[in-house]
Amino acid sequence: MTVLSLIILLPIVNALAILLGAPARKSALIAAWTQLALTLFAVFGYNRAAGGVQFESSWNVAAEWGMSLKLGADGLSLVMLLLTALVTVAAIHVTPRIEKREGLFYACVLLIDAGAAGAFASFDLFFFYAFHELALIPTFLLIGIWGHGQRHAAAWRITVYLAIGSIILLVGLAKLYLAQNVALLHGHRTFDMVVMAKTPGLIPAAAQGGIYIWLLVGFGVLISLVPFHSWAPGAYASAPTPAAMLHAGVLKKFGLYGLLRVAVPLLPEGAKQWAHLLLLLLVLNILYIGLVTIAQKRLDMMLGYSSVMHMGYVFLGIAAGNAVGLSGAAMLMLAHGLSIAALFAMAGYLRQSSPTLAFTDFGGIAKKAPFLGYAFGMAAFASIGLPGFANFASEIMVFFGAFGSTPRPGTLSFSAIQVAVICGLWGVVIGAVYMLRAYRQMFMGENSGTAQVAEPSCCFRWAIIILLVALLIGGVWPRSYLSFIQPSVEALIGK
Amino acid sequence: MQQILPAIALEVSVIILGVLMLLAEAFSRRADRTHMAKYAIGVLAAILGFSFFTKAVPGDVLWNVYSVDATALFFKRIALGTTIAFLVMALEYRHVLARSIPGAEEGRGTGEFYILPVFVCAGLMFMASAVDFILIFVSLELVTMGFYVLVAYTRRNTLTLEAGVKYLILGALSTGFLIYGITWIFGISGETNLALVKARLVAGFSGASITDSTVGPLVGNESALLFGIVLILVALGFKVAAAPFQLWVPDVYQGAPTPVTAFLSVGSKAAGFIVLVRVLDVFVAVPAVQGKVTAVLVLLAAATLIYGNITALPQENLKRLFAYSSIAHAGYLLVACASLAGDNAAAKEAISFYLAGYLVMTLLSFLILITVARHSRGDDIRHFNGLGKRSPFLAFAMTLAIASLAGIPLTVGFVGKFLVFKTAVATGHWLLIGIGIVAVGAGFYYYIRVIAAMYWREPEDATPIAVAPPTRIAIAVLGVLIIALGIIPGPVLGQLKERKPAAPAHLAQH
């Protein structure tokens, strides 16, 4: 049993134990911290000199189809696993007292965690897909039972949206599986992603475009790519704090991770065919959603929209298709996950003083609760990409990568991606407008609203500090993460 | 694995069991009939065990109307498993049964309710092996006759009587269609054995001269063949609840005693599909009609998917909801049937696996429905309100069943859906895939309403629900199966692997 299978099994076993009557919060905390420890063990145990996929284990479940429960991790998966573990620890720490059905609540949170970890650690196409869906019903229950506001409508919408997105994705993956050139695989198709990545020319160039668009739409729904985004802001606004943190911070990254892991290495020709569509959609993600975000009057909705908007930058990195852009995209996934989780955690805390989270209810929080003022400020600055945080390092890589990506003759015109980068830079300004405006209104000046905010508990503070420290490390010393990400990304694009 | 018994011993022992039960019912006045059901469960389980030691002998049994290949054995096991689950459910249901039969009390006067399913089981098992239109017809009727009685069994209930009448009339009508269709096929090919029909049709349409005197003037006549095929498709469409032959389903499912509903939705559907696959195998092999048969199947699948999923959306009664959802599942299976022409082996694999998964999840959900309905005195969705508090065990198991029905990964229902979509992609049925995507989305909505009721809402009556040990064991076994087969589908696929090709063997003898 490798460390990865422990990382996945631990939350599942703990969730079942909680359902059978183990003390809920205590077990969840133990599971989360043990998972973080195991993940760190894996991160430091990973042999960077050797690179590639390590900690491999494989268990044959249907040999005829080439399907096995194959776990493994390269640098990219390790970084995503680290994100999962960090956000889970923080999410369980910041959870306030649960009044009704505490056990079910923590079991659901742990199952989401397990699903995300399983997806990031799977190197079998089938289980990579399947683990992600483990989170579907727990999310439905978390939002529906413990959510706020229009929680029932939000729960239905996210579930049906993600279900349809997943089934579109499934069709795409089935096409991918069937399009494999079996002559290169000794006559048997395979679900093994390691084998697939190692077989150049596995998918015939002519078939790639038809597969890529299914994957783009399927993953796009999960990532909230415009115009498939409308489930996300409402769901995050209505979700209980840990669910919003895990979903916006971790689960949404599954779609991006899938594009990096499946579409980038296997379907380069398909990506070229649809490059212009992707650029158009990601610019809409940045500019259109950015303007929508400015119009929001409530903190939770603003954060929800901003998390949709930031997906545009990651897409830009993926569209760039070179090592710099893709590494930037991968690191931005981590950075955005950490910063949005911290922001949602603090928004959840502020909700205790004002259930609607309207900006006008707050004012001068920084005076009464200096820690909250500093922490929220740092997370907000990180999120809009100010230097010193991992977001800056990764966004700049995305922009440089996209701007400098050499076009291949006759396919992607140079100006299209250049225009997208320029629009993306305007997005940074838009981000500054809404974030700083919200910060000024809520945290600066005198208390003009009705809400009284007190300083959070020690436990809460440490959770936020963990997330911010991880962000600062990436900002000050990007090599710490990039030394894991970059070799894996280069392996993906075959360098 | 040693193969010591001929497969037909399985059917014979099931029939002997049924006859013994009939004798006990007739001559033992004092015996508690529930004991009879318990013995039957034991014997059927033993037969199920023996099925792993049987010899697969293709052809050569019962004048070539009966053949055993791996798929047939697989479906025999499905029939046995379903019948065992039915009897477990029937025991859980005996209180309702006693209330609904004039002059009956618990354990008395309800013997047929445990005996008829055994004969239905025998019919299902024969059908799994039927490779001749005659045996197909006879075994189908054996099954349907049993169901005519079972559907109308709780006769104090007016809804049940209505269901019984509807099922009888429409069932008889579809039998008429089937026999008429078979007549046409026989008229064209001069044969009833499927393999021979196939050989004759292929030869007749390729223009080869046929010297056999039994072949009539219609050989090679495409319209006549299509007419026969369509009649048979109508009849089988009725059995598998495909739109537009599905009108009986909601009323019959709601009115029939709940265990019968479960048996009907699994047994009748599995039987219908195995016959459909065997019959279609013949027709899609004839190049002249292959395209047209596929087009009809595409239309049937599209109509069934749309009808089943859309009409399931507003249902408030859980049995009705399951009725519409069973139509929807028939739609997915028909998608695989439509791929039989292009991707034969994978489509068959998809159908068999889907049915196996459908069996497990449907039986689990009905078992829980019976248990909950007994305590809540009703089978609407609102009777499941707050089940998460009343019985976390039942709620969790129901969540598994629902997740599987909706097709969420790591459950057996997902693997089935994946196989269906895979074979549809391979044959390029993009219309069906498009409809299928919308159907899955709609499916999520109506299935998850049950989960919402169980966990979001407060119970009307908060008394905890006690679950009897046998039911508890059955629920646990089915729940574990859903997850286990969802993660490790390999063993089921191994069961489906043919040890030796069956069809050419008895072709060679003629």
Image: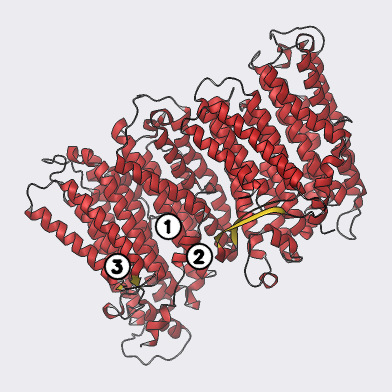
Choose between B306 and B96: the one closer to the eye: B96
Q: Earlier in the sequence, mark 3 or mark 1?
A: 3
Horizontally, is A403 left or right of B457 in the view? right
Work out how far the residue at label 3 is from the one at label 1, CA to CA, in angstroms: 17 Å
User: Does A442 appear above or below A275?
Assistant: above
| Residue A321 appears anywhere in the view | yes
Determine the CA span between mark 2 and mark 3.
Answer: 23 Å
Q: Which mark is residue B355?
A: 1
From the top left corner, tell me how far across and down residue B377 is, in percent.
29, 32
According to the picture, the residue beneath numbered tag 3 turns out to be: B126
Give the residue type at disc 2.
Ala
Mark 1 vs 2, N-terminal side: 2
Quadrant in which the C terminus of chain A appears: bottom right
Badge 1 crowding class, 10 Å Cα cut-off, few under 14, some 14 to 19, many 20 or more, is many
Report crowding for label 2: few under 14, some 14 to 19, many 20 or more residues within 10 A (C-alpha). Answer: many
Tell me where residue A57 appears, x and y as whole percent: 64, 55
* CB-based contact (under 8 Å), mark 3 and mark 1: no
- The structure residue drawn at horizontal position 72% and vertical position 53%, both measured from the top left corner, is A54
- Please report, as a chain letter, where disc 3 is located: B
| Dot 3 and dot 1 within a common chain | yes
- The residue at 18%/43% (across/down) is B155
**Mark 2 in CB contact with mark 3 (< 8 angstroms):** no
- On the image, which quarter does residue B21 sit in? bottom left
Q: Earlier in the sequence, mark 2 or mark 3?
A: 3
Chain letter of mark 1 equals B
Amino acid type shown at disc 3? Phe
Q: Which residue is mark 2?
A: B347
Q: Measured along the vertical axis of the image, is residue A332 above or below residue A301?
A: below
Along the line of sight, the residue nearer the viewer: B374 or A367? A367
Q: Nearer the viewer, residue A279 or A404?
A: A404
Amino acid type shown at disc 1: Leu
Q: Residue at x 28, y 43 (%)?
A: B255
